[in-house]
Amino acid sequence: MHLSQADIVIILGYFAISLVLGLYFTKRASSSTEEFFLSGRRLPWWLAGTSMVATTFSSDTPLYITALIRSNGVYENWQWWCFLMTGMLSVTVFAKLWKNAGVMTDVELTEMRYSGKSASFLRGFKAIYFSMFLHTIIKAQIILAMVKILDAGLGWDKWTAILISSGVTIIYSLSAGYWGVIITDFFQFILAMAGSIMLAVIAVNRVGGLAALTSKVAAIGSHHYLDFFPSFEDGLLGIPVLTFAAYIGLSWWAKYSSDGGGVVVQRMASCRSERDAVGATLFFNVANYALRSWPWILAALASLILYPDVKDNEAVYPAMAVELLPNGLRGLMFASFFAAFMSSIATYLNLSSAYFIKDFYMRFLVPKATERHYLAATRVSMLGLSVLTAVVTYFSESIVGTFKFLIAFGSGTGLVFLMRWYWWRVNPWSEISAMLASTVVSSVIFIKFPQMPYYEKLFLIIVLSTAAWVIVTLLTRPSDENKLIEFYKRVSAGGIGWRAIEKKLPASSVRSIGYRSPILQWLTGTAFVYALTLSVGMLLLQRFAEGVMYAAVGLVSGILLYRRLYGQQRQSR
């Protein structure tokens, strides 16, 4: 055991605080399924936004980023930085659409958008697909990271780590539902950030400070660890450049959550207004990319000097926490690991159960029961999904490998999820064929061609899956006209892709939708957050001229974004 009694006391104290905060809201969460899954749709932007950041800041994140840095350097973070472009679409476009839809889960949209038995089948299929398959893989990846952390800190075996690390989270998630998730997220995010900053400061100081860190890392072999973009040494068609191009050109719009995704949609739906939904999503993107990345990156760069020969790159981060921190601080650091872990697991457990209960159990199995019955069924489903996740986790090995598979696995569905808002012809079979094609193609490629470059895998999955769903769309019947008109009016759809439906409406009901303003908002917002992200990193890594330049770009684009977003909202009132 590497933790002292003082460390254990601090960790137990954190557990007690989280449990009390979570259980405090049990009575309120037990009043209805809407309170249990959406906190009554009354959250302010800062609380919903912090919960978004806390959910994506999990125990696996610093281990994953450490592995990226140690394998290729800073530029490899574009593997996930690219998703900012999707995130800004949520801010400038989809926050409004999802709030207008008024759904509890993103899966619920299927029967709002489509008609007939195929729409019902799609809703049930996605409910099972997300709750029992996709989210199980995500949760397993998070728990696997905690297993590695607890192995480094306490020497626990895999099953012990799985059961104990999940125990407290399951208790308050079962009792307090989404209220427990949201309130504990706020506390847990603060603690998790404090822990990551603390370890980064100590690791960098151990190396000799920021200036010494950059000079020592720059002197390591032929690797370009400090580069923010891939090197062109291997030419324009070199694997690093092509992989980077795949991230920037393909990954962000092809991901399965291209129009927001379940976690973000749930938090937008729980906000008290459209303005709060936009503010929450904007805050999430700024904090997620520009702020929280750099403590992990600095610690990972320091690890290259402090632990040059360690082979398991994912295990380096918890090893640093054990070996570099003194008693007390070590306990605080492990409490921050638990905080990051618990916020993510609680969210995905709540959302997985929402899919299963709201979109499958209530819709198809028991449609006319009492709220008390549904709340009991919700808690049973959460226990069952937890057991399934524990089994999958036991057989998982690699965090980075799982993450890259998830990106590729869902990449065949992203375009159809975007197009369902903008093209009336998309129907249930479009989504079904995209999901099936993406599943089959990605599985075959990863199993049969493991050595194929990642960018080639991504390209093939996207092209073949897109071809499949477009062909299926054109060969199958569209949804009922009345259903499409109802959806058009409800979510404020429109544009070129809805012209055929607009012809069926009186002129007074046709909505003029401009593309120029949302596109400019999206581009401005993306420039703002990327400039802020790069300026923070460059200033920390002693590249002051470039850092100031990016900061100036961030300031100008930030002012323009604020005017475009909130100036237009004031004018519309």
Image (cartoon, rainbow, N blue to C red):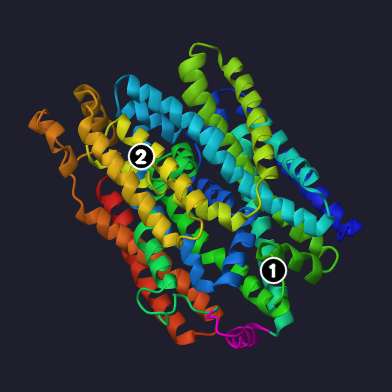
Q: Which residue position is annotated with label 1?
A: 311
- Position of residue 218 measured from the top left corner of the image (x, y, whole percent): 57, 86
Residue 318 drawn in magenta: no
Query: Which label was assigned to residue 434?
Result: 2
Query: Magenta span covers which residues?
Result: 209-224
**Label 1 packing within 10 angstroms: few (<14), some (14-19), many (20+):** few
Q: Nearer the viewer, residue 347 or 43?
A: 347
Mark 2 burial class by Cα count in 10 Å: few <14, some 14-19, many 20+: many
Q: In the displayed structure, would residue 238 be above or below residue 422?
A: below
Q: Residue furthest front?
A: 448
Q: Residue 127 at what x, y percent from top left?
A: 48, 30
Percent position of residue 300, x then y: 64, 71
Q: Magenta stretch containing residue 211, yes or no?
A: yes
Spot the residue most to the right. 5
Left or right of 356 on screen, residue 387: right
From the top left corner, tell me how far across and down residue 456 is, in percent. Answer: 40, 59
Question: Which image quarter: residue 205?
Answer: bottom right
Disc 1 marks a residue whose amino acid type is: Lys
